[in-house]
Image (tube, helix red, strand yellow):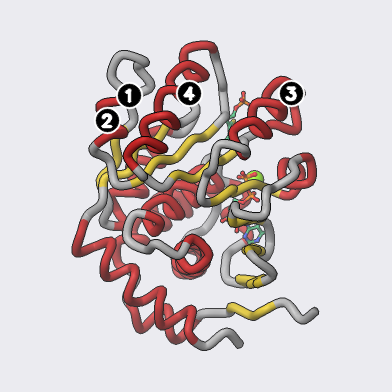
Amino acid sequence: MSGAIPERAVELLGEVRRRRPRIHCLMNSVVPKFVADGLSALGAIPSMTSSPEEVGHFVAKADALLVNLGTLDAQRREAIGIAVDVADEKGRPWALDPAHCDYSPPRAAFAQELLARGPAVLRANAAEYDLLAVPADVVAVRTGKADRIAWNGAVLHVENGHPLTALVTGTGCLSGAVIAAFLAVEADPFLAASAAMLVFGIAAEMAGKTATGPGSFEPALLDALASLEGTHILQFAKADNEQG
Ligand SMILES: Nc1ncnc2c1ncn2[C@@H]1O[C@H](COP(=O)(O)OP(=O)(O)O)[C@@H](O)[C@H]1O
Ligand SMILES: Cc1ncsc1CCOP(=O)(O)O
Ligand SMILES: [Mg+2]
């Protein structure tokens, strides 16, 4: 058991709620409302514009950025270029979610280009993850039944979660946003990503206790993100270092 990570996750969740970081999300057109609601429930502040005229200004003063490649179009590609330039210039951490890059070679190529531009974290499902070569300086998060977080030879498995998560569209997208929220308050991206996945997985478990299907799971997950306490993290965390 990786003893320090749950304790740090408790502290970092407290920091998110105290500091209320603004997370700018370049989000697909399917789930922006759910992702914004999830960030608000967690205690962060979402902003969502993809306007090329405005996105630079939004990112310049945001605390972290999330780039999600779902429903990618020409305007979002342009906005992503501007957003990453500004994040780089201002030293803002950002996370990349290469949503559905396994369905489209041009999207996979764009994801690979973006990985070379220095995101702190990549968050991908297994099919997306397997297509990409993750540079050594990027924390690699592969989600699924268990989440795997890898960086610099350290590998953590988070076993928390609930199967209904896989039946609600946008939970992967929201998990990327939660990672960005933790990046906003923690400079160590491995710790930030690990804490985020623990919090998200434990919130999903709590939601799964009352939900009767995917329809009731979605609002229950928002409620759990808002009501999750440090004691729940310490009680329920299932995080283990990978044995070599
Ligand atoms: N079978 C499962 N059991 C529990 N949690 C799961 C399962 N499958 C996915 N999840 C969780 O659902 C979220 C979305 O993961 P995933 O389905 O891998 O991404 P995506 O939605 O991008 O395809 C993650 O938080 C992951 O931990
Ligand atoms: C994350 C996600 N889940 C279902 S649709 C979607 C957005 C990506 O859509 P597309 O595959 O059309 O780019
Ligand atoms: Mg899924």
Earlier-in-chain disc, 1 versus 4: 1
Q: Residues within 10 Å of mark 4 (few under 14, many from 20)?
A: some
Which label sits on residue 81?
Answer: 4
Q: The residue under label 4 is which amino acid type?
A: Gly
Cβ–Cβ below 8 Å for labels 4 and 3? no
Q: Which is nearer the eye, 37 or 128?
A: 128
Classify mark 4: helix, strand or loop. Answer: helix
Element under disc 1: helix
CA gap, disc 2 to disc 3? Answer: 29 Å
Density class for disc 1 (Cα within 10 Å; few <14, some 14-19, many ≥20) is many
Disc 3 target residue: 104
Dot 1 amino acid type: Val
Task: Say which residue appears at 48% left-offset and 54% top-offset.
Answer: 217
Disc 3 CB within 8 Å of nearest ligand 2 atom: yes
The residue that disc 1 covers is 55
Q: Which residue is mark 2?
A: 58
Mark 1 touches mark 2? (CB < 8 Å) = yes
Q: In x, y percent, where is residue 56?
A: 31, 25
- Residue at 76% x, 81% y: name it: 243
Residue beneath the point at 61% across and 87% down: 1
